[in-house]
Image: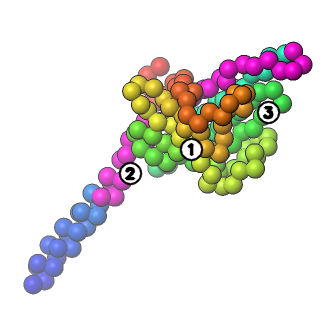
């Protein structure tokens, strides 16, 4: 009887370890890298052209990913620390705290946007943040481009 219990404990320990490793190995680490989005410039009422650039960096820290989002344009600048969750197909980018500039009235944990890989395109689904210059509300776009991946041979 004790031998049977010991086998059951070993089996459940191995099963638990396998499930734990499966949850950690989601392929999310493939998102580490540099991303950029340049909004379509628009003419301001004063006659100059307004531009807005979004830079997004994802780094691996310990067993998770962390991001830094910087938005820079006409009278706009903020740099945010972000959390990253998801898998190899899509990630949610969530607000942690302001590094520099204004906080955009965000609350910790707010989902800023979601990035998904679909048919070779990098799709952005906007949530708490959205493009600044577009005259119409954009809910989804092929906005960000991957500049380079971390740990790539380039």
Q: How many marks?
A: 3
- Asked whether residue 138 is in view, the answer is yes
Q: Residue 21 at x, y = what percent?
A: 33, 54
Q: Is residue 129 left or right of residue 140?
A: right
Using the numbered discs, state the Cα–Cα distance from disc 1 to disc 2 in whole angstroms. 18 Å
Decide whether residue 27 is among the magenta residues: yes
Q: Secondary structure at mark 3?
A: strand
Please name the residue that numbered disc 2 is placed on: 24
Mark 1: few/some/many CA within 10 Å (<14, 14-19, 20+):
many
- Residue most extreme to the front: 136
Using the numbered discs, state the Cα–Cα distance from disc 1 to disc 3 in whole angstroms. 20 Å
Q: Earlier in the sequence, mark 2 or mark 3?
A: 2
Q: Quadrant of residue 6?
A: bottom left
Quarter occupied by the N terminus: bottom left
Please name the residue that numbered disc 1 is placed on: 93
- Residue most extreme to the bottom: 1
Image: magenta residue range? 19-47
Q: Is residue 108 left or right of residue 9?
A: right
Q: Residue 61 at x, y = what percent?
A: 53, 45
Q: Secondary structure at mark 1?
A: strand
């Amino acid at each position: 009887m004790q031998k049977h219990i010991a086998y059951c404990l070993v089996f459940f320990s191995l099963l638990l370890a396998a499930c734990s490793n499966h949850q950690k190995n989601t392929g999310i680490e493939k998102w580490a890298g540099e991303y950029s989005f340049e909004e379509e410039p628009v003419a301001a009422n004063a006659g100059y052209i307004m531009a807005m650039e979004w830079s997004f960096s994802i780094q691996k820290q310990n067993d998770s990913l962390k991001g830094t989002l910087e938005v820079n344009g006409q009278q706009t600048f903020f740099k945010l620390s972000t959390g990253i969750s998801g898998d190899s197909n899509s990630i949610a980018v969530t607000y942690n705290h302001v590094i520099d500039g204004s906080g955009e009235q965000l609350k910790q944990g707010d989902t800023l946007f979601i990035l998904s890989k679909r048919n070779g395109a990098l799709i952005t689904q906007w949530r708490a943040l959205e493009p600044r210059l577009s005259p119409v509300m954009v809910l989804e776009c092929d906005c960000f481009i991957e500049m380079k991946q971390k740990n790539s041979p380039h």
